[in-house]
Image: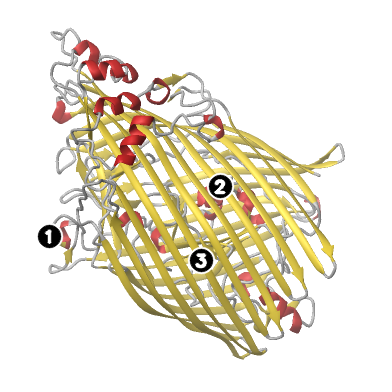
Amino acid sequence: MNKPRLATLLLLSSALAMPTLAFAQDTTEPDTQEPSSSNEQIEETTPPAADEAPDVSLPGEIVVTGTRSRNITKVSDQVISVLSTEQIARTGEGNIAGALGRVTGLSVVGSGFVYVRGLGDRYSLALLNGSPLPSPEPLRRVVPLDLFPTNVVASSLVQKSYSANFPGEFGGGVINLTTTAVPKESFLTISAGISGDGESTGQFGYSYFGAKSDWTGFDNGSRDAPPALASFFASGSRISDIDVDRQAIGGELVRFSRATLQKVGNLPVNYSASITGGTSFDVGDATLGVIATAGFSNKWTNRDIIAQTTASPDLSEKEADLRRVVTDNRIVVNGLLGLGAEFGDHKVRLTGLYIRDTIKEGRLATGTIATSGPNITQMFQDTAWFERQLFDAQFVGEFRFGNLGVDLRGSYAKSQREAPYETAFQYVRTNNANDPYGNLFINRLGQNPGGSASVSFSDLDEDLWFGGIDLTYRLNDRVGLSAGYSYTDTKRTSSRREFQFRASSDLPTGVSALRPDLLLAPGIIDFYDINLIETTESDPAFAAGLTIHGGYVKANLEPFDGLSLDFGVRYEDAEQTVDPVQVFAVPSNSGASTLLANSYWLPSATVTWEFAPQMQLRFNASQTIARPQFRELIFQQYYDPESDRLYRGNPLLGDSKLTNAEARFEWYFAPDERLSVAGFYKDIKKPIEAFAAFNDNSVVTSYANAPKAQLYGAELEVQKYFDLGDWMGPRRLVAIANYTYTQSKIKVGSGDLVEVFGTTAQPAENFFRDGAPLTGQSDHIANLQFGIENTDRLEQLTMLLTYASTRVVSRGPVGLPDIIEKPGLRLDVVARESAKFLGQEVDLKVEVRNILGTRHQEYQSNGTNRIDINTYDQATSLAASISVKF
């Protein structure tokens, strides 16, 4: 089923002039020319034109040298793609992850994780205004970009070639989001929208009561730990200790409002609203600005999933064969406050960002499990509440003292994820005519013929402190130097406590047929002495940390007109730790700890040769690293509701080392029009790959370092406008197309070993197949945007076509095929129009998404038989929004 992105009108914004451009203006002669700009410091955003550029804020500017025509992508000394406010708006996406999916070589996997050139999200670095962000996702250190509504983003920059001013964790590329800053003039914009799709809107789904405030995305306290459970957590006792009152704790865990799944007859229409305002004013010689935005969205999504596992190596027999209906109610609240000041050649920006993303989920599955008996019908009903929250406060100061530039950056970010009261119940129906209860679903709580009940509590808290200083000095128009230092300190705590109910064999079958809140009511628990055990007792909590000291020096030279050299080296010293947290009075330790203390010298160099007017060649080479993510290291089981899969980390993972090379031809044949062709190559030592196993009829994913891998490919991008002549007035056709071809191969030798926690070192062939592609890599990725637009006012009709070929989600268990995802072909149409109504400017937008009805498919196949792991239909969606500007 489709997850329609709720449209949010994009913010009109502009920004403080970036320092590099300030240098450029010192030597600019004609208005149509300027010195080559840095790839980081780019000035304000307006609707795209040949002589204007999006606002981009990044650390470690490259000092301006020489003179070239003003074009952001062209004059950059690195390989970049920039989406301005207007370009993001053309895609019509409601979050920045969707808009980035239109960039050459980028694909979006899962809930907003962006893959660059087929490399997983661990190889992509995400920054906000040049500062790192923590992630509220237990599975990843990288923030999911679907958390960022497009109305808080002024521009998005993707840099695919490494330069030393960036952190060393740079495999596929860096994605920098720049928030809105100081407006040129006062404005107020109010927006609202609705959307729906054929699989969700007006259809039945499953949910539960929860609390009256659930529609806001905030719990009213009903999901707080009850007294007996809170006292147990604080005591340091184990649930198995004699003095623990397990019946009292168990009697508090299952309530009708939190655990009883209900059928919702007609799922409502999705809706969203936002308000944005800004102003600027002069105070003496300084210009002060303020901008603020707030947004809210509420949407429902249904997924009717085929969930299977195999019982035979040839995939001819199914172990689990389930149909699972998942209904998500996703509520997003976001706000941004930006303060800016310009005084002389100095500029200061303060930014505060808040995003809260909540999912209220209900799941109901029915089907068979072969080992339980082919005639027994299984039923699983689950409820969940997932809160993700991100707060980020940033300071950016850009100061100019003649030819010397000093940039200061500091930020504090806090992310949280809470999942209280994840309930999971399994009922069985024997379908036995001789059984008086054979036509009823019963839950024997661990006794024959089956059934189970569990409640879990998860909590994640992460704090990230960042500080950096960058110095730049321009010796002359052709030589510039830069150097910088940055400090990053990340601390994460993660806990998961899961409790299972176990009944004795004398539990009456009639009682077993009760719904969850009655089956586990306090009176039933006490009378039948239903026990409570904790399945996460070995290591229920972990603490993780990552401290990085980084410094770099870099030079930018233009020895003669048309040739630019950018080279530098970065040094990084880092310590990464993961340790179990002792939560019990009597300590225990599985030994699942990690200590990675490494230092690296990471060189980079880029040569740009403008061998003919508007034509140039680029050559880039660099060395970078990729560190394992916290969750990949934590030996703790975690359930991901989106992939319907269990995950467990491997504390024995190590860093990956990458060698990168790229060559690119670029032709800028007209303003805002270009053609580029590139080839790239990467050699990866010890890449981190996901592998799968099947446990209790579920897919369990873990991680290991493969011996090495190689990746290579080519990119093609073209952007062209077509004048329609006088007969169509001020309208033109727009064509933007890109294609990426990628090949990757894991290299496995007969003597290679893999370390997985809990076992001795094993042959790598037990986990990885020589020649297999890297996980997440599609051979073919293509995007086409074709439409018509008015050059005098907002009037656009755009067709967006996206294609991605199959990619490996996870390595299959020994002897079984890999788990494959098939993204396929997707067609969207977005129409935008502005008009005057009662003297006010009104913008209208209509979106039709997934017109072809492309399914989501994850499966195993050997060419003859197929097992669908996570496959469901996605319907066409329709959205409409209106925005009024005052």
Residue 195 screen position, x and y as percent: 59, 33
Q: Which amino acid does label 3 sit on?
A: Phe
Residue 593 visible to an observer of this rendering: yes
Compared with 225, 282 (above or below) is below
Closer to the chain start, of discs 3 and 2, is 2
Q: Earlier in the sequence, mark 3 or mark 1?
A: 3
What residue is shown with label 2?
355
- Mark 3 falls on what kind of element? strand
In the visual, does 343 lie left or right of 681?
Answer: right
Q: Which of marks 3 and 1 is in front?
A: 3
Q: How many marks?
A: 3
Disc 3 or disc 2, which is closer to the eye? 3
Mark 3–mark 2 distance (CA, rounded to whole Å): 19 Å
Q: Where is residue 347 in the image (x, y as percent from the top left)?
A: 71, 70
Q: Residue at x 34, y 27 (%)?
A: 253
Mark 2: give few (<14), some (14-19) or many (20+) Cα within 10 Å. many
Identify the element where label 2 is drawn: strand
**In the shown orientation, is residue 169 left or right of residue 249?**
right
Q: Name the residue under label 3.
A: 466
